[in-house]
Image (tube, grey):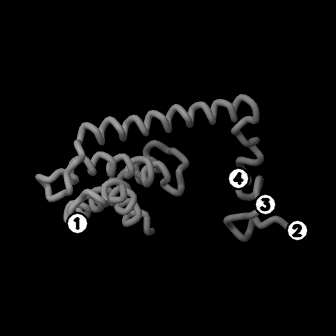
Amino acid sequence: TYNGPLAGLVAVCAGSDLMHPLGALVVGLIAGGLFVYMFTLVQNRWKIDDVLGVWPLHGLCGLWGGLAAGIFGSKALGGMGGVSFMGQFIGSFLGVGIALVGGIVVYGLLKAFLGIRMSHEEEYDGADLSIHRISATPDREPNW
């Protein structure tokens, strides 16, 4: 898949105006490896259903990019300067906290008022077939 290089792009974008190109290369390479490792861990060991890898790709690599902007954006490593690691650390984790609280509120309201679980039959058929009336496999295609 193209998610490894995309992970590098996600991470580099946080400090693309600050980093030296070689620093950006290092950030991108670390992000690509981080994505591949964490995607495998999330799917196989933690058994979290994130087939597109949204959390490791955008969440984790975005957080790494925010932190890396404070590291590789410094003049000592060839960056433009004007950024501190602690500033990036505080801002990055504040963003994670806001997103986490927002997600808990939204999903809590959805669960309370609408419900977020499918029935056992819908779960067996799959969300694509049950909700959208399309199938990922041709043998389970609905007859119109």
Q: What is the CA distance from the residue labelled 1 to the residue labelled 2?
A: 54 Å
| Residue at the spot 29% in from the left edge and 46% down from the top edge | 67
Sequence-first disc among 1 and 3: 1
Out of 63 and 82, give the one closest to the viewer: 82
Q: Amino acid at mark 4?
A: Ala
Q: Are marks 1 and 2 in contact (CB under 8 Å)?
A: no
| 121 lies above or below 105 | below
| Residue at the spot 39% in from the left edge and 50% down from the top edge | 62
| Residue at the spot 32% in from the left edge and 35% down from the top edge | 90
The mark closer to the camera, 1 or 2, is 1
- Few, some or many residues within 10 Å of mark 4 (<14, 14–19, 20+): some
Residue 19: image location, x then y, percent:
24, 59
Residue 56: image location, x then y, percent:
42, 50
Residue 46: image location, x then y, percent:
46, 42
Residue 143: image location, x then y, percent:
86, 67
Q: Secondary structure at mark 1?
A: helix
Q: What is the CA distance from the residue labelled 4 to the residue labelled 3?
A: 9 Å
Work out which residue is located at the far front of the displayed protein and give it.
82
The residue tagged 1 is: 21
The residue tagged 4 is: 127
The residue tagged 2 is: 144
- Left/right of residue 42 with respect to residue 76 in the rendered view: right
Q: Amino acid at mark 2?
A: Trp
Out of 130 and 86, give the one closest to the viewer: 86
Q: Secondary structure at mark 4?
A: helix
Q: Secondary structure at mark 2?
A: loop
Q: Amino acid at mark 1?
A: Pro
The residue tagged 3 is: 133
Sequence-first disc among 4 and 1: 1
| 79 lies above or below 47 | below
